[in-house]
Structure formats: C-alpha cells, structure tokens
Image (spheres, coloured by chain):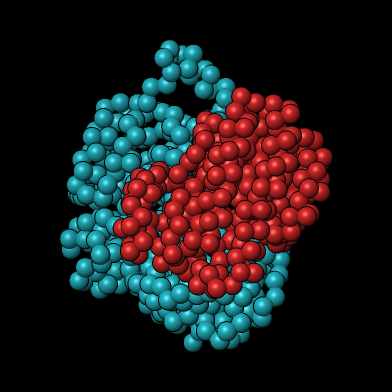
Chain colours: A red, B cyan
Amino acid sequence: MKDRKILIVGGNSAIAFEVARLLAEKGASLYLLGRDTERLERNVQDLQVRTEGKVGFAEFEASDTASHKALWEQADQEMGGLNGLLVAQGWMGEQEQLESDFEQQKELFEVNFLGAISFLTYAAEKFAQQKDGLIAAISSPAGDRGRKKNYVYGAAKGALTLYMSGLRQRLHGSNVNVLTIKPGFVSTPMTEGLKLPLVAQPEVVARDIVEAMEKGRDELYTPFFWRYIMTIIKNIPEVIFKRMSV
Amino acid sequence: MNSTPTKLAGWGNFPVHETLLCTPPAPSLDYSGSEPVLARGEGKSYGDASLNPGGLTISTRHWDRFLSFDPDTGLLLCEAGTTLDAIINHFLPRGWFVPVTPGTRLVSVGGAFACNVHGKNHHADKSFAQHVTRLELGLADGTRQWCTPNDDLFWATAGGMGLTGIILRLEMRLIRVETSLIRQRSLVARNLAEMLSLCAEYDSQYKYSVAWIDCLASGDSLGRGILMLGEHATREELTKASLESPGGQKLSVPIFAPGMLLNKFTITAFNELYFRLQKSKAGDSYLPVGPFFHPLDAIGTWNKLYGKRGFIQYQFVVPEAEAHAVVTEVLNRCRAEGWNSFLSVLKRFGEDSPPVSLSFPFPGVTLTLDVPVRNGLMEFLELLDEIVLAAGGRVYLAKDARLSAESFRLMYPEFPAWLEVKRQVDPDWKFSSALSRRLAMEA
C-alpha cells in the first residue's frame, strides 16, 4: 500500500476513517473529502502521525455533483497522481419521511448514488489509462433486495452495486480492481439510536475491507455472515416476500 | 447531546449504577445541564471511580485520535480517549514504548492520568503523570484550559479521579526502545524477608520489577514467591543471544500467564514454576511486551470469572520499614479468615510525591489482593484498612469501592491541599462521582 495514493470520499464516515487508519499504518498516502472541516482536520492529524505518506483534505458536499470534477483534479494534483479511490459517503434518511417526499428522495440519490458515480467516472478514466488503480465503494446489503423498511436507501445502494458490477467488467484486464463493499449493521453515528441486531464495530469491518483491497476481491460482505443472510433473503419468492415484514 | 440511561460498573463489576451515558464523536464540552458530570474512558478502574449515578457520564471512547508526534523528542499529543494499546500497536514497531503502563494496556490516557497509574518501573520512573508534559482540561464553567507540570491544577488532576474537569487532550513523552522484547530475569524468594531484600537489591539494577507472592504459603515460607525483573532487550544482545543458541531463543521460563486463570490451576502453575526456578536458581528469558506487562489482557474479560457479585482488588502501600510486618499480618489474616487470593502482587515503589495530588504511590511496598465479593468481605477489608492505616499506609482509589470517608482522610493527608485547587476550578462540584460522594469529599 506504500505506493497507493487514495482519495477517500466521505472521509469522516466511521468505517472510512477506520479503513484510512489501517491504510495509513501500511504507509499509503491519503486525501480525504468530508463535510465537517473541524472533524476532517482531526482525522487528518491522526492519519498524518500514522503514515509516512502524504495526507491531504478538502471540504465537499456529496450532493453538489457539479463541484466534484474540480475536487478530483485538485486531489489528483496535490497527491501527485491518484491511483486509488474509496467512495464511502452515505445518508440513510428516515424511510417514513422519504417515501412521501420526492425532493428528499432525490437528495438521497444525489448523496448515495450520483455523488458516488461522479468520482467513479473520473477514477475509471484515469486508472484505465494508467493501467493501475484500486476502486472501492461502500454499498450495502440493503441494495440486494427492496424492503419496505428502507427501499429508497436500498434502491440508491442497489444502483451503486449494479454500477460497480458493470465497471468491474469494463476495467477487467486493465489492472484496475473494482471492489463492492456491503457492510451489515455497523455501530456508527449513522446507526446510533437504532435498535439493530448483529451490530459490528467499524474497526472489525475496516480490517475486512483492507484485506479485500489487498487481495483484489470483487465483492465483500462484512461481517462475512451477511452473505448467507442476503442469499436467503434474495431467494425468497416475491409472492411470499411481499407479505413478509423483514 | 444524545444520552441514554445505562447501567455501568467498573472493572470489578461492583458496584453497578445507572447513569445517563453519552458518547460524543469528538472532544466536547457539552454539559451545561445541572446534573453532576463525569468523564469515563475504558472503564478499567475497578470500583466506583468512573461511575456517576444519577448524573451525566461522558464517554471518551471516540476521542481516540493521535494529533502529532515528534520523533526527535518522543512527544506524542493525542486525544484523551486514546488507549495505551493503540499507542503501543502503532509505536512499538517503530521503536517507541509508553513510559508507564499499568497491568492492562486497555486503558485510556485520560484515565491513566486521572488515576495517575503506576507500572512495574515505578521504582525507576515514577508514575504516569510524571511523563505528561501538558494537558487540555474542560472546566466546570465550560471553558478549556491547557495545564503543565508548573500548574497546581495539573497535579490536582493527576490522580484527581476525574474530579477537576474533563481531560480532552494530552501530551506525553514516549521512550525509545531498540527491540519489542523484554529480557526477563526471574528470582526465587523462599519467604517474605528474602523477597523484600531481593527487591531492594535488584530494583536499582532493573527498570522493571514485580513479584508474585504465593498467598497460600505459611510459616517459614510465608511470602515466598518469584521476583520478575525486566529490561528492554537491546539489538546487540539479541544478535549475540541468537548467535550463541542456534535455532533462536529458548524460553527458560514458560509463559503461562494467559492460562493464569484465577483458580486452583493458577497456584499449580505457580508452584511448578517456583520449584523449577528453585532448582536452577534463576532464569533468564526474552519475551514480548504483552506477556510481560499485560498477561491478563490475553484473557479478555477475566473479571467475569468472579461471578455476578464481582470482586474487589485491594491494593495498599506502606512505608518500607513497615512492609515486612504489615504484609505478614495481612497474609496471615487472609489465610486465617478464608479470604484466599491465590496469588498476589508485590512491588517496591520509588520516590514520587507530586504536590496537591491524590496520587497513590509513595516510597514503600505495595501489595495487591483480588477478593471476590461475598458476605463479610467489607468488614474484613475494614480490618485491613486499620492495619494499613496504623502503618502509615493507604489504599489505591482507582481500585477502591468501599473505603470509608474517615479512613480516606487519614490515608490521604494531601486532601485539604487538593480540595483548595478543586474549589478554585469547581466550587459547586459540577464534577463528581460515586467515589467522591462515598468518600464525602464535598462535605
């Protein structure tokens, strides 16, 4: 990881920051985009102590996709040529508010999907050309099947999963690995206050993610058992599924 | 700030109290309400020092960022919730180690400072706070203040059990090490007198020193045990040692610590080691810092082994001149009254007298006993308090859950001076804990 210069979009997210820490321990250079500068600075300080590589950051708004090209170029320039991207921003929203409010749904898609594929587009272009790169995005098991409890969020993440899958095929053979990450419930500020089963700690999920990055995996469920849970959920016939409350 | 009613206990699982717990993502001073406030790190103090029944408990768990490190001086600035574990994990492979570590590395630096913890090197390097160069404190009036060792507030906060304010950030000096191994020397003492004289003799030669005492031995063998001495191994000696013994290092002393469960097996393992060492007189070995400093961390929640009612770790220190008489009396009483603490830990403290501080260590000998909570324990420990007090000793507040207010005042003559500083920064006792209320510090 010593030669990796990775842009992390959503660098204040609990999972992304723990991943960044592990990458920093391995000597990677990192550039963080996040919303709250004060929190970002704190994270950047921590990473700078850990890595001998370079650490930079800039403030950004995931839904302001028009600004993303300039941010990408700025990061690329400051780091002296990026060769890694981790897309980690996420906003879950409140399903009950979302389902009756189109504007909010639109915003959720901007944050979770459009604000992700902007960076994926720029990274794919550059990495394919230089025949070197690592692309990872944090999607969600929620994107595997629509459920009434979170289908708006699920649809945005599902779109991201499909996009990554296509991108993986496109970049196959160009020495660019494309990793789709599907973390289960993780104890983060995003899930604080929710009563959730099987909650994992961000440090544990981050270890899995970094291992998958190093091994060049395509898809990662973390913790691992979510793969089995989602296999079951995906295989329930729709006639039954529609009556269920999962 | 979101807060949730939560039941909390210290590491000893006794007592348990309900509090409003909040876990801010970054160091914050969000405590403008009227309820009493207390910061809590990893919750590794044994008794009620980190408990705030009916009040607001601010967890520092997420305040775990390194902020800066200067490789020329070893100065590390970090947030208060950073654990010694995180520091060792990052810095040891790079040739640095923490200046002082207690028996577990799973403590926050804020907690380590607030309890002014000590380690196996106390005789050589004093306590934790002596290696801290500055800290930022959140005060009762909602302001932040940096303190240095020149300030009374710094020393009132060292060992101040979190009662002067909330430690937000802290700068400490790491020490240089050449390798990640400890060269350990183990010596057998056939009784207490021999142990105390071994401690006195070898402490000046070794940076780390601690003894295990067999609590079940009596008569002429009372106080028998193993003195474990340690030094950070140098690169040169490791090269030399591996040249001398082809095939790498042989451990002459088994690392049985992770299996050192607190039951009869422990004493069996102890005996085996004791007699093996007695035959060979002494054993030298190289071992990683983990088994040397933090053997119980490998077991994780060993505190649960004592069952639902929890346990108390009773640790006291008495002046060296009284050590033989007091330790003999305490061990005899424990055995006679059936309070067996299979193994106990003995260590000689060095010079350490921070001003206006409620710090525990002073020059003398400290003994630690683990005792499960059952009927009659409180009365028994009060008896021990009297023995300790009569010898001019004191018990460790970070491990205490039951000391009386009167005994506390007698054991800590620095308390009035400490209280002066407390009154200057927090006259209304915004910061208080189950411990401060039990010890009637406010009255």
Choose top left, top right, bottom left or bottom right for residue A74: top right
Residue found 37% across the figure and 40% down from its top: B227
Locate residue B300 relative to residue A186 in the image: left or right. Answer: left
Q: Position of residue A72 (x, y in %)?
A: 77, 45
What number of labels is visible?
0
Q: Position of residue B430 (x, y in %)?
A: 56, 82
Whether residue B228 is situated above or below residue A63 in the rendered picture: above
Residue found 65% across the figure and 26% down from its top: A174
Q: Quadrant of the N terminus of chain B?
A: bottom right
Residue found 70% across the figure and 32% down from its top: A127
Locate residue B411 relative to residue B376 in the image: left or right. Answer: right
Observer-nearest of B333 and A29: A29
Residue B75 visible in the current orientation: no
Q: Residue furthest front?
A: A239
Locate residue A243 relative to residue A28 in the image: left or right. Answer: left
Choose top left, top right, bottom left or bottom right for residue B439: bottom left
Q: Position of residue B73 (x, y in %)?
A: 72, 43
Observer-nearest of B390 and B182: B182
Q: Position of residue B326 (x, y in %)?
A: 33, 60
Residue B281 visible in the current orientation: yes
Residue found 39% across the figure and 69% down from its top: B8
Locate residue A151 relative to residue B153 in the image: left or right. Answer: left
Whether residue B261 is situated above or below residue B202 in the rendered picture: below
